[in-house]
Amino acid sequence: MKRTYEPPWRMPTWSWFVPARIPARDPQVRPEEWASRRRGTVRLMGVHGRAVAVLLLMTVLGMAAAVLISVVVAQGGARAFESASLPVAAVTVLVIVGVALASWVAESTGDALTDLTSARTVHSVRLSLTERLLAAEPTELTPGQVLNTVDGDSYQAGELKEILNWPVMMVAYLLGSAVAVGFSHPLLGWLLVLAGILTTLTTFATAGPLARVAARRREAEGTAMSLATDLAQGSRVVKGLGAVEASAARFDAVTGRALRIMLVEARLTGWLTLVRQLVPTLCVVGIVVVAALMMRRGTIGTADLVTVSLMVPPALMYLGYSLSFAVDYWSRGLVSTGRIRDLVADLGRPSTTADGAPLPPTGLSVWSATSATGVEEIHRRLTGLAGRQDPEVVVAPHTASVFEGTLADNIDPLGQADPEHVQAALSAAACGDIITRLGGMDGDTLPDSPIGEAGLNLSGGQRQRVALARWLVRDPEVLILDEPTTGLDAVTLDVVAQNVARLRRGRTTVVVTTSSAWRAVADRVEELS
């Protein structure tokens, strides 16, 4: 029996925010426009403004309903027992059930939109950062640093939406409770508002130390993740150098520092939470005592005292917890916003070298540096050529970036290249052994065996040849290769050099290298000293 997927029932109050079709464009996140970390954090909280507005409305309505339930329970219950009236009791129960249902709808919608806006904000931030990474010039940032910001900090940016739920909910509950208690006696309502203000001031007064230690923790975590990523990518080099123990010791030191800072943050959070909850606890005791004295003097009735006892403790105690929650998320979000802003600033920083360098002549040229000055000159030329922003001028990086997937995904990801041209490029890069290792050709179809994350199922030389084949398939008018064959043995290197010279005949190709194999097939050799 054929089964078809049927999505679970979704409440219409929030399902409009997750349509069946993916939106063509999510709201743009532009960190370069943030004047400060604080403004950036506020902007992130407002991403997907329509959904945020509905979220806030539902949160307030849910708490208003909760306040109304407490009032109905206290007043209706007291009147029902005093009059021993069954109709009064029945009406009270019906009102409670109806208001509870409305509260459930509002709170369910608010909770759903909190999670959904958080997830879509994370997606928007990551998409924005990825677009900038793809368009940026090479930087000195390590992959670990970039990954930590794109992953961890973007997630923390999305978590800022949590501030719009529980903390807002408890502020609304406090204000509603103050109004309800104020009907019993205005003094009690004002005392509750004053207690809420004292609780808020205490919470924010303790936010500074937590923000500082949160910044230190994110920095330590970023350093640890950066080092872990770099060691994982360079594990073969580390083993080859015999530096495994030294690398492990360095990693232990970095992670140990991160752990110590995390423990400091945990202890500080515990003590600050104790201080923050002490104020609302004392205020609750004081207000209930005042209400009891007023009832004893006959100023308020028994039902009023029940109302105060039902509403004041949760209003103040949970307000303290929720504000502590908000301060924690705000502090961490503030740090992450600053790191996102700094990353975008680093990616957008213009090169200090001149761009628009003249194009090399047609044919295969070799640039060979024989001194530090020569290396600097080659770097200046490569930066200038990359700065031309011409799709027919490709400056291939030295690092052989191979992506998870199949050989075809890496060579011709769009599947638009002519199969014969793909075969010619693979032959020129001497990729025959790679194709055989991955399962061989099926007619004109490349093998679909996975090559592993970052191509780690291949050797360093094989990854270089795959990357070279990718640029040969791209076939630009001007192709600059920076030491493309350092991982190849002498025989394979000689074959690749001759094949590339033959395949690229009539176009402009520059190879930055000191290899004699490339010099032997070059139309011209320029030694830079």
Image (cartoon, rainbow, N blue to C red):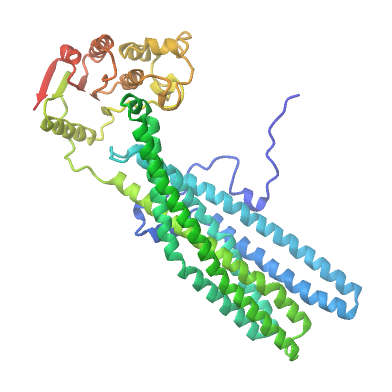
Viewer-nearest residue: 510 or 332: 332
Q: Position of residue 354 (x, y in %)?
A: 16, 40
Q: Is residue 504 left or right of residue 122?
A: left
Viewer-nearest residue: 5 or 175: 175
Q: Quadrant of the N terminus?
A: top right
Q: How many numbered tags mark residues here? A: 0
Q: Is residue 336 above or below residue 445?
A: below
Q: Position of residue 382 (x, y in %)?
A: 20, 31
Viewer-nearest residue: 31 or 389: 31
The picture quadrant where one finds residue 142 is top left
The picture quadrant where one finds residue 90 is bottom right
Q: Position of residue 197 (x, y in %)?
A: 54, 76
* Residue at position x 46%, y 57% in the image: 265
Q: Quadrant of the C terminus?
A: top left
Q: Is residue 488 above or below residue 384?
A: above
* Residue at position x 11%, y 29% in the image: 371
Q: Position of residue 376 (x, y in %)?
A: 15, 34
Report whether residue 337 is seen: no
Q: Is residue 523 above or below residue 199?
A: above
Viewer-nearest residue: 406 or 313: 313
Q: Is residue 290 left or right of residue 518?
A: right
Residue farthest to the bottom, as pictured = 297
Report whether residue 12 is seen: yes
* Residue at position x 14%, y 23% in the image: 368
Q: Is residue 484 left or right of residue 267?
A: left
Q: Is residue 486 above or below residue 337?
A: above
